[in-house]
Each structure stands twice: as C-alpha cells, then as structure tokens.
Image (tube, grey):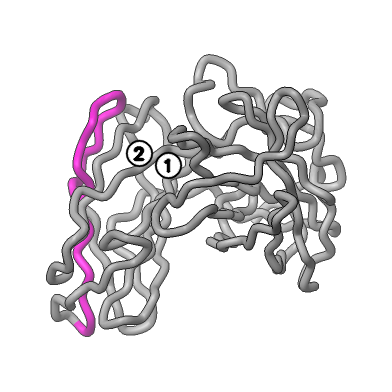
Amino acid sequence: MAEDHHDSDPEMNDHGHKAPLGYTDAGSHAHLGGLTVTTNGLQVEPSDTRIEPEEAHEFTYKIRTENRDTVTEFEETHDQLAHLILVRRDLTRFQHLHPTLADDGTWSAEVVLPDPGVYRAFVDVLVDGQPTTLGVDLLSSGSAQYEDPPQTTREATFEEYSVELTPEQIPAGESISLEFKVRQDGDIVRLEPYLGALGHLVALRDGDLAYLHVHPEETDPKDGVIRFAVRFPTADRYRLFLQAKPDGELITTSFDVQAGES
C-alpha cells in the first residue's frame, strides 16, 4: 500500500491540478457517466462532502436543473428510483445503496465510510426517460492508505461462493458479452432476480473512475450464469463489481480486467 497525501485536498484532480470539489476532468470521454456533477442538464448538490470515517452519517442531496429547480419526479431504473454507488478512489470500499426521496426532492441515505480517503459518490437516476449518472467526491478525513493498482483477475470468491468471468481477452471499443458463472462449493447454483435482473454490474475505469453503463442480457432466473452487454471505450484497466443473489443471498464480488492493449 502507498500513503496518499492528496487526501487532505479533495480538490486535486488526477492531473495534479486544482478543480472544484466533486469535479473530475471529463476530457474527450464526457459521454461516460459520473465524471462531473452536471450531466444532461442535471446537477447533484450534496449537503455535505466531508464525512468522518467509521461514523454513520445521513448523506443528503438534491438534483437540480440548469435553472436551479429541484427535481422531484423520477422514474424507476433497475427496480429503484435511485442508486447511490460509493467507492474509494483506489477502487475499494464499494457500496451500493438505495436512498429515499422526500416530497421536496431531498434524497437521503445512511452512509458509513469505513476508512479515510477520497470517495466517489455516483448518483444513478432516470429523469424524463433519460438515464443519468452524476458524480461527486466525498472526503473521509485522515491519512489514507491506498491499495496497490489492480491486477487482472478472472475469479472471485464470497464466502462459499465462487464466480468465474469470461472471456479472457477483452477488446476496447467493441460491444461484447461478459459471462459470469456462480458456483457454491463447486456446484452451479440457481440465481434469483436482483433489481429486476439476474444481477447488477458496475464497471469503473481505473484512474478517473469513469462509470460505464452496463446492461444485463437476461432477466429470467437461470442456473448460475449471468451475461452483460458492455463496451469498454478505451484501452485501460477497469474494475467490475458484480452483485447477484444465489439461493436468495446477496453477494458482491469484484474483478479487474484490461481492455485492449495495456
């Protein structure tokens, strides 16, 4: 692990320059989700961006239009009105929460950031038929020990469950199908629906944490196999967070892949 001295300054972007809190340079990849606080004419406005580590905190935010109007009407996406994804900047400490919506448009969720560091909060919503992912940085104070850069992995475990990812080679810039096989003690298990599908997959690019929109290919219960259609836009490393419900138990596993040439 390497100690990160930028944690005391969440305004430092990936290029070592100052940027507003919650902003990450989108560059030529602005079509990717979660790189900015403003997308599709919507902006996420959190009440607080500093959260003490290991303490329960009611994280609240509003989504506003370009005219500063608060959005109060949302449509369901993956069986929920909103998804709040939290992950530390080293692609660890993943959380997937479902905040509640008040009549005045305030979203709230109880958040516990387990360790110091800069976290990225992704707000995934559907407004007027337009899926939108907004991103904002949160600071958990203290000296952060960031983990080493990810290495490629094709297998992961969660208690007695193991998950295998194929294919071995993943191209960049092409739509492909990712297949995950879930086993319990070596035997294929039956999967139950989770969030309206056989599983939920979050894909984040190493470095800027660009959020890829990933779509399940099947929704009917099936023995141990989940497929997702995905396009990795650039030749980079990505971390995949898979959530599934074998035999009714929610499990979360992560995989690191290299798309295209390293």
Check if residue 67 falls in the magenta segment: no
**Residue type marked 2:** Gln
* Residue 258 tag number: 2
Q: Does residue 244 sit above or below 259 in this rendering?
A: below
Q: At x 50% / y 21%, what residue is drawn?
A: 29
Judge the density around disc 1: few (<14), some (14-19), many (≥20) Cα neighbours within 10 Å.
many
Q: Does residue 205 sit above or below 91 in this rendering?
A: above
* Residue 58 tag number: none
Q: At x 84% / y 51%, what residue is drawn?
A: 48
Q: Nearer the viewer, residue 53 or 123?
A: 123
Give left or right: position of 101 versus 30: right
Bounds of the magenta segment: 166-185
Q: At x 39% / y 54%, what residue is drawn?
A: 78
Q: Nearer the viewer, residue 261 or 28?
A: 28
Residue 258 visible: yes
**Whole-percent x, y for residue 244 in the image:** 33, 67
Judge the density around disc 2: few (<14), some (14-19), many (≥20) Cα neighbours within 10 Å.
many
Q: Quadrant of the N terminus?
A: bottom right
Q: Secondary structure at mark 1?
A: strand
Of pointers 2 and 1, the one earlier in the residue sequence: 1
**Whole-percent x, y for residue 30 in the image:** 53, 21
* Residue 238 tag number: 1
Q: Closer to the observer: label 2 or label 1? A: 1
Q: Nearer the viewer, residue 194 or 159?
A: 194
- Residue situated furthest top in the rendering: 28
